[in-house]
Structure formats: structure tokens, C-alpha cells
Amino acid sequence: MKTTPITANPLTVQLEAATAQSRAFRQRRAELQADLADLRDRRQAEMRAALATGGDSPALKAIRVKITDAQALVEQTDQLIADGDELVKDLHAQVVAARTEEEKVAHAAEVARHSSIVEARTAELDAALEAADKAAGATVIALAELEQIDKVAAARLVGEARHLDPKAAFLARGWKIGEFLFSDAFEWLVVPILPPVVGLDAYPVANVRGYLAARDAAAQAAPGVRQ
């Protein structure tokens, strides 16, 4: 007997071929064992006949040769079965390892895909927060300018701006406030951002009245330029 050649097919196909080959070896061994048992029965019959005639018959000698050959084939088949079982075991391990590696690759791809989505959304959020901060800064300046000419009117609008909450309208339409999976709260607070003004560059926080004074002084120092 000789083994069926297995080409470089995908691992699952190789495993199926090796398993089928192993089954064929076992079936062939069972057939050889049956042939060997039949030869031994025939040998017993020929031995009884030889005893009656007082010598070995050519048929008995031929049966003994066949028994020797059959035993050798059984032993060869046993070795093929052992080799086949080892091959099946090795291929099965490779299939498991390949599946694990495929799962790792698929997992990494999913992580990368979702990470890119988070990064894109974070960039959008960062841009939106920057725009909101700038809009808040423009609002603060407009309120301060209004206060300079009419404190009563400014007071009313300051109250509205101070408690500005756009979420209420969304919640009324069925939107939900998302709760994060993380223990630490996110701090996405909108802070009024004011454009740079000469004289206040070194100060990260500016009192709005002082800011307006510095801005107007800078505008007077450079006629036609409004920062």
C-alpha cells in the first residue's frame, strides 16, 4: 500500500483528506485481518491433511508464504495507520491554530475599524466644541458691549445666556442623555474663548470688562484694525 499524496490545499481540505485516508487504512487493515484469518484456517486444514500423508504438501508451503506476506502487510498497514493518525492530529492542531489566528486578525480589524470611527467622531466633537467655545466668547463680548450702553437690557439677556441649555428641546423630542461605560465623567464643558488681544497675551483668563478695554485700546492704537 502507498499513501494518497496530499497537495498544498487549505488546511481544512487537507484534514478531511487525511481523515478519509486514515479511515481507508483501517478498512484495508480489517480486510487484511480477515484474509489472514482465512489463510490460517486453510493452513490448519492443510496441516491436518499433511499429517495424514506424512509430509508437507506444496499447498501448505504456499499458504505459509501467503500468511507471512499477509502478516507483513498488516504490520505495514499498522504503521500507515499510526502515521495517518499523527498527520490528522497535526493537521487538526494547525486548523485550530489557523482559526485562532483568523479570529485574532478579525478582532484586530474590528478594533481598528471602531477605533477609526471613535477618532473621527472625537475630531468632529473637538471641532464642534471649539466652535461652541468661540460662539460663547462672541456672546460674552456682545453682552458686555450691550451692558455698556444698557445694563437693564443686558441683565435680561445675560440671564438667558447664563442658563442656556439646548438639551431641553432635544429631550422633549425623545432624545436621551447617554451614560458612559467609564467611571470618570467626561468634561465636555463649553468655555467662552476670546480672540487674542494685545496686552492680555500672558493671561489665560480675562475679565470681560478688562478685555473690552484692552481690545478697544488696541483698536485705537491701530486705526482701521478691529480684533
Image: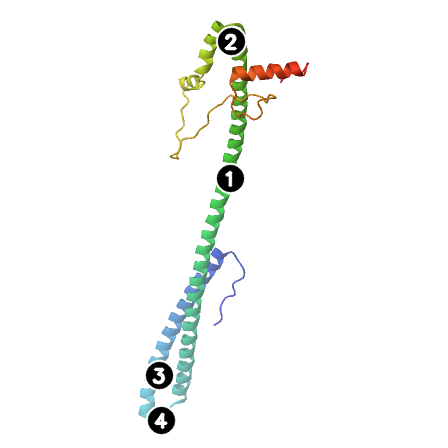
Which label belongs to residue 147? 2
**Residue at image coords 51%, 5%:** 150
Q: Is residue 83 above or below residue 223?
A: below
CB within 8 Å, label 2 to label 1: no
Identify the residue under disc 1. 113
Q: Secondary structure at mark 4?
A: loop
The amino acid marked with disc number 4 is: Gly
The amino acid marked with disc number 3 is: Arg
Q: How many marks?
A: 4
Mark 3 Cα shell of 10 Å, populated few (<14), some (14-19), many (≥20): some
Mark 2 Cα shell of 10 Å, populated few (<14), some (14-19), many (≥20): some
Look at discs 2 and 3 and give the one toward the viewer. Answer: 2
Q: Secondary structure at mark 2?
A: helix
**Residue at image coords 49%, 8%:** 154
Task: Locate residue 76, reporting x and y percent.
Answer: 43, 75
Mark 1 Cα shell of 10 Å, populated few (<14), some (14-19), many (≥20): few
Which label belongs to residue 138? none
Would residue 174 appear left or right of 9 to someone viewing this image? left
Q: Earlier in the sequence, mark 1 or mark 3?
A: 3
Q: Secondary structure at mark 3?
A: helix
